[in-house]
Structures are given as C-alpha cells and as structure tokens.
Image (tube, rainbow, N blue to C red):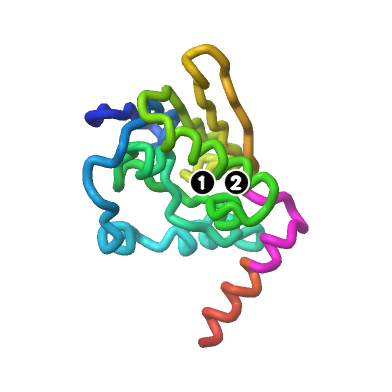
Amino acid sequence: MLSDRCVYAFDRLVERLVVAYGISSKPQLPRDRSRIRGFPDVNVGVRAVLGERAFLADRGHYLAHASGGDLDINLFPHRRDLNRGWKDDGRRFRQMERYVAAHPGTFFYHRPIYDDDSWIPNELEYGVLVDDVHWWVSAFKNKPAEGDPVTAAARLASLNRVQE
C-alpha cells in the first residue's frame, strides 16, 4: 500500500506488515489522538496470543507520525518500554526516530521480524540512511524473553485488570 510519503508492504496471506519505508517529512496534519484511542487495545491481542509471555504494549507506529507516518495502517503492538524509551534499547530507538523527524528528506525503514503467525513482531529492525551515505541500522526485541521483568509486569497488570 502506498501513501503520499510512505510505502507499506503486506503479506496478504497472514495479513501483516512486512516492511514500511519512506522519506521523512513534517506531519501533514496534527496527531489525531481520538482516532488512535479508537484503535482496538493492542494489549488484549498480546494477552490472547502470548498468554503467560504477554507484555505491556502501546499502539506503536512503524513510521512515526513526527516523521510523516500514517495512522491506521501503521499501528502495531509495540513493547511499551521500547516505544517510550524507558531503557537503553528504547533510548536508542527513540534517538533514531528523533533523528529522522529532525532531518526531513531522510530515507528510513522499519521491518518487523516475526516468530509466529500473529501480527506481533518478535523483533524490529529500524534503518536510517544518514546524509544519503551511511546506514544506521539497529534491531530491537519487541517480545521480551521468558523471565524478563517486562513480562512479569504485564502479567501482574493483566491480573489486576481482571480483579477490578
């Protein structure tokens, strides 16, 4: 699927994104927070698919709104601490996103890497073409490893929601 500034390639057989890429630009419209809030709660899907391995997730954007990314087609279950930059890997991820947003005209891509048939990426590869010369590419775990404190926190949060 092609938008004005971005390309979203899908595997129609399993109905999930394979790669999103584009040339960064300033957002065309202000962020529509009510529309994003109207998108289904990704945590419900994460718990349904992963059970005991569930993690707290945000409605993440493959291509950030600040870099010209779209809304609906662009959302996925993004590990909350990674998306918000709360740990070292999240800070690196946010640093890359901020670079792209601050440098309109930069080519960048985001590639989900799956380990099952769900739409929840196990890993995320994010790449930026810096100054049209050098690649800056990093991979990030989206699903925490078994025993990771993020998984334990998600399990506790889901139990608390059930008891309320």
Choose top left, top right, bottom left or bottom right for residue 54.
bottom right
Residue type highlighted by circle 2: Asn
Q: What is the quadrant of the N terminus in the image?
A: top left
Q: How many marks?
A: 2
Q: Amino acid at mark 1?
A: Ile
Label 1 or label 2, whichever lies nearer to me, is: 2
- Reply above or below: 87 against 5: below
Badge 1 vs badge 2, beta-carbon distance below 8 Å: yes
Mark 1 or mark 2, earlier in chain: 1
Q: 60 or 132, which is in the foreground? A: 132
Q: Is residue 143 magenta?
A: yes
Residue 87 pos. (x, y %): 68, 53
In the image, the segment drawn in magenta is 142-153
Residue located at (44% from left, 58% from top): 42
Residue at 30% over, 60% down: 33
From the viewer's perspective, is residue 56 above or below residue 136?
Answer: below
Quick check: is 98 in the magenta stretch?
A: no
**Residue under circle 1?**
120
- Residue at numbered disc 2: 142
Q: Position of residue 164 (x, y in %)?
A: 51, 87
**Secondary structure of residue under mark 1:** loop
Query: Foreground: 57 or 109?
Result: 109
